[in-house]
Structure formats: C-alpha cells, structure tokens
Image (cartoon, rainbow, N blue to C red):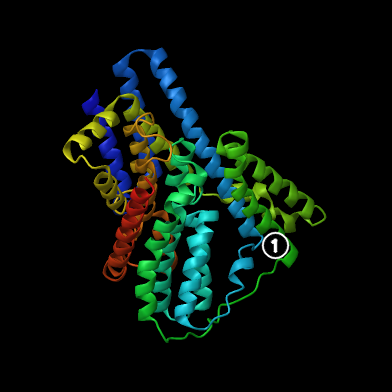
Amino acid sequence: MLVALIAVFTLAYLAIALEHPIRVNKSASALLGAGLLWTIYALAVGDHARVGHELDETVAATAQIIFFLMGAMTVVEVIDAHDGFEVITSRIRTRKLTMLLILVSFITFFLSAALDNLTSTIVMVSLVRKLLDRQSDRLLFASMIVIAANAGGAWSPIGDVTTTMLWIGGRISALGIVEALFVASIANLVVPLAVVALRLRGQTFALSSDVDGSERPAFERNLMFALGLAGLIFVPVFKQITHLPPFMGIVVALGVLWLAGELLHRNKKPETRQHLTVAHALTRIDMSSIVFFLGILLAVGTLEHAGILTALANWLDQTIGRLDIIVGLLGLLSAIVDNVPLVAASIGMYDVAKYPVDSFLWEFIAYCAGTGGSILIIGSAAGVAAMGLERITFLWYLRKISWLALLGYIAGAVVYIVQFRLMQ
C-alpha cells in the first residue's frame, strides 16, 4: 500500500510541477491524485469505519481553509469592482524612478499583508503598466513587486495561502507570526530593493498615456475599500476574541460587506448594480485555485493518516538533523514546485505536541515557503501572475532577478535565526 500511495502522490506532484510544459491544469492533477490516493488507502486498510472517520477529519480541516479563501477572494473582488484600490494608487505623485520603485515596493509589501500576495501583485503590476512607458522599466518593477508581495505575505496570517494554512492549522498565532517574521520579511525586500534602487538612481520617467481615472464615485470607492480592508484585518481579531475558526470571521466580514453593498446600490438600475454585487464577485473568484487547494489538501491527508509523512520527518531528522537546514531547503524547493503541498506535507510530518504553536519550525516554514518562491518567476502565484501580465520570460527573470531574490531570501533567513536566538 505504502509504495502505491507514494507512487501516485509523486506522479500527481510531478504533474502539478510540470503544469505548463504538459499543458494540464494542476487542479485536475490534484483532484485525480486525491481520489486515487483515498481509494487505494480505503481498499488496503479495509476498515471502513476508520477510513470514514479519518476522511471526515481531513474534510473538516480542508473545508476551513477553503471557506476562508473563498470569502477572502470575494471581499477582494468586491473592492476591485468598486475601484477601491484607487484609494492607494492614486496618491503616487513622484516622477523619480528610484522613489517610485521604493513606494511601489513598500505599498505592495503592506498591501500583501492586508490582502494577499496574488491580489496585491495584480493590482500593483496593473498600476505600473499605467505609470511607465518603457517595457524594461515595467519588467524590473513587476519583478520587484513579486518579491515585495511574497515578503509581505509571509509575516501576515492572511497574506499568503501557506501562512494561512499554518494559522488555521493551529501551528502559528496571528500576533506571533507578525512579531516573528516582520523584520525578516523587511530584510527579504530591502536587500534586493537597495541593489535595484542604486542601479536606477537619478533616472526619471514620463507618465504613460494609459493613465485614466476611476468612474466610480469617491464615496463608493472609499467606503467599500475601508469596509473590505477592515473586514480582512478583523478576522485575526475575531479569532482571538471568540476562539472560533478564521472562516467564521470572514463569513461575518463578507456578510457586512454584502449588506453595505445592497444598501449602497439599492436605488440603481439592475444593469448598473449587477457587476457591483457580492453575488457577481462570487462568479469572478479563481475557483480553479480553490479546487486545487481542495485536491492537494485531501491528497496530503492520505499520506498523513498512512504514517508516510511521520516516517519522512524521522528520516530527515536522522539524515540532516538540523531543522534550520531542512526548512531552508524546503524554501528553495518551493521556487521549483508549488509551496502549498510542501507546507501541507510539513504540517503532517511534524507533531504539534513536539513542536508547539509559534515554535521555530512553524515560523521558519512560514518565512521560507512564503518567500522562497520569489527565486524563480514560476515559484509563486504572484510570480505567475506577473509573468502573464507583463510577459516576463523565465530566462530573463533567472538572469536579472533570481540572484537578487536569493540574496533577500538568505538575508531574511539569517535575520530570523539571529532574532530567534537572541530572544531565547
């Protein structure tokens, strides 16, 4: 049974990693892999009651993450439908290229922590396309946006799906991860940013001819942006006060936003208000990604119940021995393959009784898995989004940006390890 499970998971993982060359959506590979793994496991074990109970546990844990992501994605889509992000982007006035890069990078960094790295990348790359005419400048800015978005998402419980998984899985706390990784994430961004900023020193830019204003009234933009952002920030506070799962917080936030939208647009014509509603936003969220998360989390759950992940953890401890090296290599691997199954596997590999909440292992996994994907353009959802929007080639990014992202990754890792040891 174990050989069959490992073989099926490996094939599914390879199909996910090679999604673009083989032209098969990774969601299909994840779903098929999950179905085959549970089928093999159920037939091999033979104890239907036990397998049913284990599947119920896996589904319950997976559903919490899925519901949270669906709610958060919907909130972001509602903000975007109202041009809410203009509240931030319209305030950029500088004409110096270095200052613009610094502003864009830090806005992305903090926006990613409040929303998520994928959304922040799309918003900021779209902004840069409106501001800059030269393609060479846009490619450089888009690449720095990827690094900033991944760095910003790592220190927030809602900024990156892998950090969210660790938070919902009870491996990190909201306040703990902010305190632990904020300085390291800043280092991850500042090191490559300083190099690029020095390279652009003294250069200016002309405003692109594509700049246009929002058609939405300022009150609507500001209200929906404020409500949406407040709702997302409210989720960790809600969990801390009520001790309910985070998806309940996002349910409340989405309900408030939905009610506000209904009241705000109640007197408008149906054709005018239709694309501004939460109901319409639900049709625009990336369901393919949601289905991928569902499949991969169910697949990893099989390996956990079969004891494969525990055995892998023991082998790594015996072979390598040092957690910092193991997790550091995990981060580098996340530049090549998807970090979601890597983090899902690590949650199953290590027991929370041995490694409690906010321990070195979980915090360092959040940092490495969140930022390691910046090293290659295909290593993160933010990178893939930027790749599509600005047509960044893999080889261009590898030559121009990968070494900068690697420097930032190493700098942040060193900062976190030193900080952790000083606080012990």
Task: Indicate the position of residue 41 as horizontal and vertical percent values.
Answer: 32, 22
Placement of the C terminus among the 4 image quadrants: top left
> Which residue occupies the foreground of this view, 403 or 220?
403
Placement of the N terminus among the 4 image quadrants: top left
Viewer can see residue 406: yes
Question: What residue is drawn where x is 42% and y is 42%?
Answer: 292
Q: Which residue is outermost to the right?
A: 267
- The image shows residue 209, relative to residue 55, as above or below, that is below
> Which residue occupies the foreground of this view, 240 or 145?
240
Identify the secondary structure beneath mark 1: helix
Task: Indicate the position of residue 395 as horizontal and vertical percent values.
Answer: 27, 67
Task: Indicate the position of residue 153 as horizontal and vertical percent values.
Answer: 46, 54
Viewer can see residue 287: no
> Which residue occupies the foreground of this view, 344 or 386?
344
Residue 400 in the figure: left or right of residue 66: left
* Residue type pointed to by label 1: Asn
- The image shows residue 91, relative to residue 42, as above or below, that is below
Task: Indicate the position of residue 118 as horizontal and vertical percent values.
Answer: 47, 56
For disc 1, the neighbor class at 10 Å (few under 14, some 14 to 19, many from 20) is some
Residue 67 in the figure: left or right of residue 257: left
- The image shows residue 45, relative to residue 99, as above or below, that is above
Check disc 1 and report the residue beneath it.
222
- The image shows residue 318, relative to residue 85, as above or below, that is above
Question: What residue is drawn where x is 52% and y is 66%?
Answer: 107
Question: What residue is drawn where x is 69% and y is 69%?
Answer: 215
